[in-house]
């Protein structure tokens, strides 16, 4: 099924998940929702469940499965992805790797319906979130973005807004009301999950823009987590950060993976090896649209890939 760019104005939403600076160079969006979509209520807030046991006695898998089927994408006449299929299991970290320009970010943006905000952009295929097509007719754009959050390359907190208000920004923009004590608990919970609570607990009323780059990125993660997404997309979330901040974010990713499905684009092969459970290797050869050459468990992709191009890429011989 072909789907042309369908933004209708209210669709220019990255919800609060994305924040004011938008996704960056390609398709920057800075508007917030208006009208009915702006006040779409969230489900009632409930404290996050504690660790639970699955049938095998281990932790129950949370998050949702995401299944991309035969995704093709165009910018104008130019096809940049060709029938890419990838299953991203619930509660796992999937890394998208590959050389620059092969369509990783485009694929990521298709997963939460951001691609369609770019003028002239089009796509074909299906994205199933726990079996339901996020592009189904009648399905709200904001609903997809609430369930599938996004963290960008460049940290984009609301700089003048307090740390506390940054975390709750998504709730207010989507119309959720909750008591002050529930809100306090949520802020602590989300900052803790993002690995930032101990560093900011005494200065929650200071502006988000006063934090370091790595702290700002963790604040953005806290903001995304606050609206309880089922999936968190991360587009090179550490590329603007120093090694210490990078390691801190990687720890956060591993901790969050217990409760949310994560899909991360990274150029850093060590990072892909450290944080992901499975990898998909994208490639666009000689001006052809990007496709997935190979995907599988991170262990296998790094130690016994079946395609020589994968071996060359993860081995640092090109890219
Ligand atoms: N807004 C846009 N308009 C037109 N073409 C675009 C746009 N965004 C991306 N492209 C093109 O689509 C192709 C895929 O780009 P994309 O950013 O998805 O690749 P990528 O693998 O994520 O690259 P990188 O690793 O450098 O971020 C590229 O050829 C790029 O030039």
Image: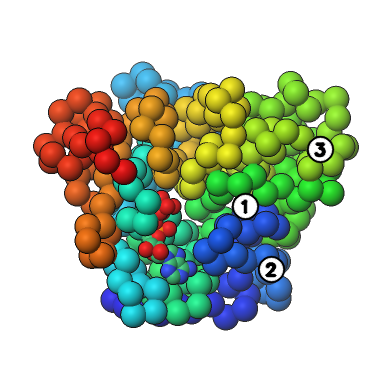
Q: Position of residue 280 (x, y in %)?
A: 28, 44
Dot 1: what SS? Answer: helix
Residue drawn at point x = 65 percent, y = 33 percent: 214
Vertical position of residue 251 compared to residue 294: above or below = above
- In percent of width and height, residue 128 lies at 35, 58
Q: Nearer the viewer, residue 38 or 58?
A: 38
Label 1 sits on residue: 17
Please state the horizontal and vertical placement of residue 221, each as a whole percent of the image.
Answer: 61, 40
The residue labelled by disc 3 is 210
Q: Is residue 305 left or right of residue 282?
A: left
Residue positioned 20% across, 37% down in the render: 312
At 36% from the left edge and 32% from the top edge, which residue is drawn?
269
**How many residues crowd around disc 1 within 10 Å: few (fewer than 14), some, or many (20 or more)?**
many
Task: Tell me the crowding category of disc 2: few under 14, some 14 to 19, or many 20 or more residues within 10 angstroms, Cα based.
Answer: some
Q: Position of residue 186 (x, y in %)?
A: 71, 37
Residues under labels 3 and 1: Cα distance? Answer: 20 Å
User: Which label was assigned to residue 31?
Assistant: 2
Decide if residue 238 is on the left or right side of residue 190. left
Q: Is residue 93 above or below residue 54?
A: below
N-terminal-most mark, 1 or 2: 1
Can you see residue 258?
no
């Amino acid at each position: 099924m072909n789907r042309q760019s369908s933004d209708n104005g209210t669709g220019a939403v990255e919800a609060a998940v994305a924040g004011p600076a938008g996704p960056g160079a390609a398709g920057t969006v800075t508007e917030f929702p208006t009208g009915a979509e702006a006040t779409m209520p969230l489900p009632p807030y409930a404290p996050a469940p504690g660790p639970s046991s699955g049938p095998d006695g281990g932790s129950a898998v949370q998050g949702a499965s995401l299944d991309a089927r035969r995704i093709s994408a165009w910018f104008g006449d130019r096809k940049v992805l060709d029938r890419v299929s990838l299953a991203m299991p619930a509660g796992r970290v999937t890394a998208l790797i590959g050389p620059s320009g092969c369509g990783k970010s485009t694929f990521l943006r298709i997963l939460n319906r951001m691609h369609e905000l770019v003028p002239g952009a089009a796509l074909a295929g299906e994205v199933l979130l726990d079996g339901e097509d996020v592009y189904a007719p009648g399905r709200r754009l904001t609903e997809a973005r609430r369930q599938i959050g996004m963290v960008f390359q460049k940290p984009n907190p609301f700089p003048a807004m307090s740390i506390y208000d940054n975390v709750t920004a998504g709730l207010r923009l989507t119309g959720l009301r909750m008591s002050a004590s529930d809100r306090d608990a949520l802020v602590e919970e989300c900052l803790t999950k993002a690995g930032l609570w101990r560093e900011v607990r005494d200065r929650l009323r200071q502006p988000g823009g006063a934090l370091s780059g790595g702290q700002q990125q963790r604040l953005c993660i806290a903001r995304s987590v606050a609206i309880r997404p089922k999936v968190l997309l991360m587009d090179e979330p550490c590329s603007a950060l120093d090694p210490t901040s990078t390691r801190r974010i990687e720890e956060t990713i591993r901790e969050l993976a217990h409760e949310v499905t994560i899909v991360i684009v990274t150029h850093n092969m060590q990072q892909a090896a450290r944080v992901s459970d499975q990898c998909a290797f994208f490639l666009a050869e000689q001006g052809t649209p990007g496709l997935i050459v190979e995907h599988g468990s991170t262990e296998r992709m790094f130690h016994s890939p079946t395609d020589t191009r994968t071996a060359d890429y993860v081995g640092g011989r090109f890219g």
